[in-house]
Image (cartoon, grey):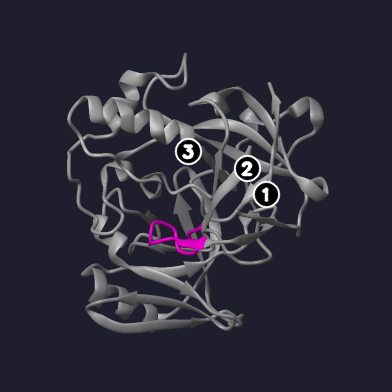
Amino acid sequence: MRITQLNIYPVKSLRGIVLETATLTRRGLACDRHWMLVNDDHRFVTQRELPAMAGVTVRLTDEALVLEHPRVAPLIVPLARTRQPRCTVRIWKDTCEALDEGDAAADWLAEALGRSLRLVRFPDDSRREVEAGYLRAERGERAHTAFPDGYPFLVASEASLSALNERLAAQGLEAVSMNRFRPNIVVEGTAPFAEAGWDELGGGAGVRLGLRKPCKRCKIITLDQRTGEAPVPKEPLKTLVAMDTQPGWRGAYFGQNAILLDGEGRAIAVGDRLTIHPR
């Protein structure tokens, strides 16, 4: 089995960046979900409630995070900033500290997206714990992340996407692309939805990822990630539910949430081969 895609999403729920190589950190691939948007109540905002976020392009340079939108000149946020005011933000049931990127960023978001929003950054000295219930307590596992929904990594399979698209085609529906599911690591060379039975993925130089929880999908996968529009309401959510891709779990599931077990600071690349360790 080998890696076919690596993706990061520096700002939660904005467009992603396709990579050829990526550095592994305990929080996920380097710079993944390092920023997010919050509303006036400091609660996280995603495409679930604001599909237009799909229209914001994200770039990273050596010096800055760059946001681009047709309505406004690019926003440049220096990476080296360290004195932003701290605030408390909410993401699902978690509350954590964040760094506010300032009024200029908020004004840019208001013009681009038409909403009162603020851009916040995850502090280097903070820690947001992964839920303990799915970790291996007998192994002493602990994990933490930045602003993903709950886990540092999301692993998805080309074969699983192909199986889903075959079912969609049988209903006369258009195929969906992998970017609907916003994975970090995409692999090929396995049976459809076989990832439900994986415990670990191993790579070269001692890299180990632990797959710990199936990823339940929401309305974001119904949105075209170029336009923010839903070409077919409720699809492919409805088809995933019917496929029962995660036996014993109610809902629509695609991909597996993962944590880093070994290999912090090491790089992985498209084309790298991985070894499966079943549950």
Q: Is residue 9 magenta?
A: yes
Residue linked to disc 2: 2
Specify the label residue 217 is tagged with.
Answer: none
* Badge 3: residue crowd in 10 Å (few <14, some 14–19, many ≥20): many
Q: Is residue 262 visible?
A: no
Does dot 3 land on a helix, a strand or a loop? helix
Q: Is residue 265 magenta?
A: no
Q: Which residues are magenta?
A: 8-18
Between disc 3 and disc 2, whose residue precedes? Answer: 2
Give the amino acid type for the residue marked by disc 3 in the picture.
Glu
- The residue lying at 78 percent from left, 47 percent from top is 204
Q: Amino acid at mark 2?
A: Arg
Q: Which residue is mark 1?
A: 272
Query: In the rendered image of this protein, does residue 148 appear above or below residue 78?
Result: above
At x 57%, y 79%, the residue is 79
On the image, which quarter does residue 197 sit in? top right
Q: Position of residue 16 (x, y in %)?
A: 44, 60
